């Protein structure tokens, strides 16, 4: 048998030695050239540098679709409540009673109701007494007529002040005044009261439970004497509507019930957040301390000062 044979590749006769592959024979005859592999080694079947592939040019390139950029959205800012012009009303004192040893309730019946929101204040002038800026509220059971103004006042048995007003005394009222009214919306509602300051807080809390039943709320109630925690019927109503964070605080330990914590009141204020809305009503010392806590946390704070007896 001959050691070589003929092989036709692409129409050309190629002599192939026995034992060689057709690819090796084509390389020996120069029909194909080796190519560089990935690591510099010669790889058969390709030229040393592959010819560039020509890409047919586009006759027309369509314009790119320009998408509008999103407009920056303004930050969400809760609008301030619209200021309501103060109006004047006349009326009479219809009821005066003691709620606790140091808190009294006075009810004024006016000829026409005032355009008040919970937390608004009025200037109350009772015949024979100096005018006072007070915040109307509700009775502790939540009741009040449309033409009634209910006030919780500090009461000193030695100097009863306005709590000594006679039923039927003439009254002049101007309001609303102040900017501590309840504002729906926002973050957690923190309500802090000291003594008769529970009056404004009670009106705000009750309105919030009706208007925003799902809003997170914490209520703190304080008094110097545990006997002045007169607001238990109101707290029972709040608890029944789902408010679980109700804190009672008293400075004095005498006759303090088990559910009343020792003071001071500001030691029991929860850790405030920037998104919190704080309403505080009471003495100047309590209101000032809570304002400092709210300012440190960046929370909004609406104070109401309760006048001394």
Image: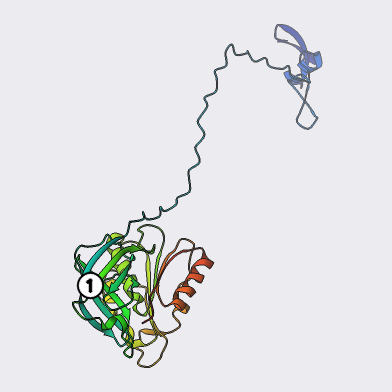
Determine if residue 17 is in view: no
Residue that sits furthest to the top in the current view: 11
Q: Is residue 137 left or right of residue 221?
A: left
At which x and y percent is residue 119?
A: 34, 66
**Quadrant for the N terminus in the image:** top right
Residue 104 picture location, percent across and down: 28, 82
For residue 286, side relative to residue 231 (left or right): right
What residue is shown at x 36% (from left), y 75% (from top)?
A: 197
| Foreground pick, 29 / 46 | 46
Which residue in the structure is indicated by mark 1? 108
Pointer 1: residues within 10 angstroms few (<14), some, or many (20+)?
many
What residue is drawn where x is 21% and y is 77%? 169
Which structural element holds mark 1? strand
Which part of the image, by quadrant, shows the C terminus? bottom left
In the visual, does 73 lie left or right of 36? left
Q: Say which of 300 and 18 sits in front.
A: 300
Q: Nearer the viewer, residue 76 or 61?
A: 76
């Amino acid at each position: 048998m001959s050691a070589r044979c003929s092989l036709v590749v692409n129409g050309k006769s190629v002599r192939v030695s026995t034992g060689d592959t057709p690819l090796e024979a084509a390389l020996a005859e120069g029909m194909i050239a080796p190519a560089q592999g990935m690591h510099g080694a010669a790889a058969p079947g390709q030229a040393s540098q592959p010819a560039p592939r020509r890409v047919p040019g586009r006759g027309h390139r369509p314009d790119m679709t320009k998408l509008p950029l999103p407009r920056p959205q303004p930050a969400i800012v809760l609008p301030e409540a619209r200021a309501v012009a103060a109006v004047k009303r006349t009326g009479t004192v219809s009821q005066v009673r003691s709620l606790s040893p140091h808190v009294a309730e006075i009810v004024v019946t006016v000829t026409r109701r005032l355009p008040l929101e919970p937390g608004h204040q009025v200037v109350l002038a009772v015949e024979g007494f100096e005018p006072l800026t007070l915040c109307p509220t509700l009775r502790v059971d939540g009741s009040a007529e449309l033409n009634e103004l209910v006030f919780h006042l500090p009461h000193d048995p030695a100097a009863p002040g306005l709590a000594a007003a006679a039923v039927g005394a003439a009254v002049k009222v101007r309001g609303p005044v102040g900017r501590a009214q309840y504002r729906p919306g926002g973050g957690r509602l923190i309500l802090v009261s000291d003594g008769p300051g529970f009056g404004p807080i009670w009106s705000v809390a009750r309105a919030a439970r009706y208007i925003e039943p799902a809003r997170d709320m914490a209520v703190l109630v304080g008094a110097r004497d545990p006997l002045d925690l007169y607001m238990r019927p109101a707290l029972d109503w709040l608890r029944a509507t789902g408010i679980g964070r109700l804190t009672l605080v008293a400075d004095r330990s005498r006759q303090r019930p088990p559910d009343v914590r020792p003071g001071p009141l500001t030691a029991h204020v929860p850790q405030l957040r920037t998104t919190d809305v704080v309403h505080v009503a009471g003495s100047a010392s309590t209101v000032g301390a809570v304002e400092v806590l709210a300012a440190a946390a960046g929370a909004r704070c609406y104070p109401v000062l309760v006048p001394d007896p």
